[in-house]
Image: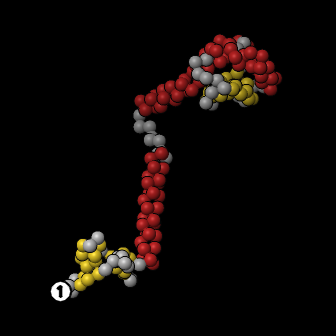
Amino acid sequence: MAIEQSIPTDAPTSSNNSGEHSVAVDNQHTPIDPSNTVPSEPVLQTLTNNHASQVQQQHTAMRIDALRKWRVRPQRLSHAGQLVELVADNARRAQREVGGFAAAWQKCADATIVNQTRIASFRGGVATIVTHNASLRWVIDRDLRSGLLSRLRSECTSAITAVRVRSGAVNAPR
């Protein structure tokens, strides 16, 4: 491995009787430290590649740790109290997700339509209504276009951007 001295080419150098070398920079002689050297170009390239590799490995390790934190398997239920907590959490999540829209849907839509539909989801301002047949989908679509959507928007506390209607099992849970 060849190492080159970092001496400016235009700087005058001198040596004393003891064999020490110095460089004249701004009319002051500074001793040259043999440990203060600049590696040659191939050595610099190898050092740069090694450093880049280490940085990449550290970044990869951090990403793997982050993924492990996100992909934690749910703990097994050890007693009935945990089951009750799980059901309550799911109910709170569903209430947050659909709550305001469900009340507006019950108030604004016709009672026969409400009884034959269920609210599947309400995310990002888009409500999804499930009905058991295509003819009821058509009726709901006509009602939404003729003013039901604007009444829902005025009644609901959440912002409604769209209401989707799809066919499916009305009495089935999500």
Residue 114 seen anywhere in this rendered image of the structure: no
Q: Which residue is mark 1?
A: 18
Residue 7, percent from left and from top = 34, 77
Residue 132, percent from left and from top = 75, 25
Q: Is residue 174 left or right of residue 59?
A: right
Residue ranking furthest to the left: 18
Residue 133, percent from left and from top = 78, 25
Camera-side residue of 68 and 11: 11
Residue 42 seen anywhere in this rendered image of the structure: yes
Camera-side residue of 157 and 94: 157
Note whether 143 is above or below 121 in the view shown: above
Residue ranking furthest to the front: 27
Q: Residue at x 69, y 26 (%)?
A: 162
Q: Is residue 138 left or right of residue 163?
A: right
Q: Residue at x 24, y 72 (%)?
A: 28
Q: Is residue 147 left or right of residue 50?
A: right
Q: Residue at x 75, y 29 (%)?
A: 167
Mark 1: secondary structure: loop
Camera-side residue of 2 and 9: 9
Q: Amino acid at mark 1?
A: Ser
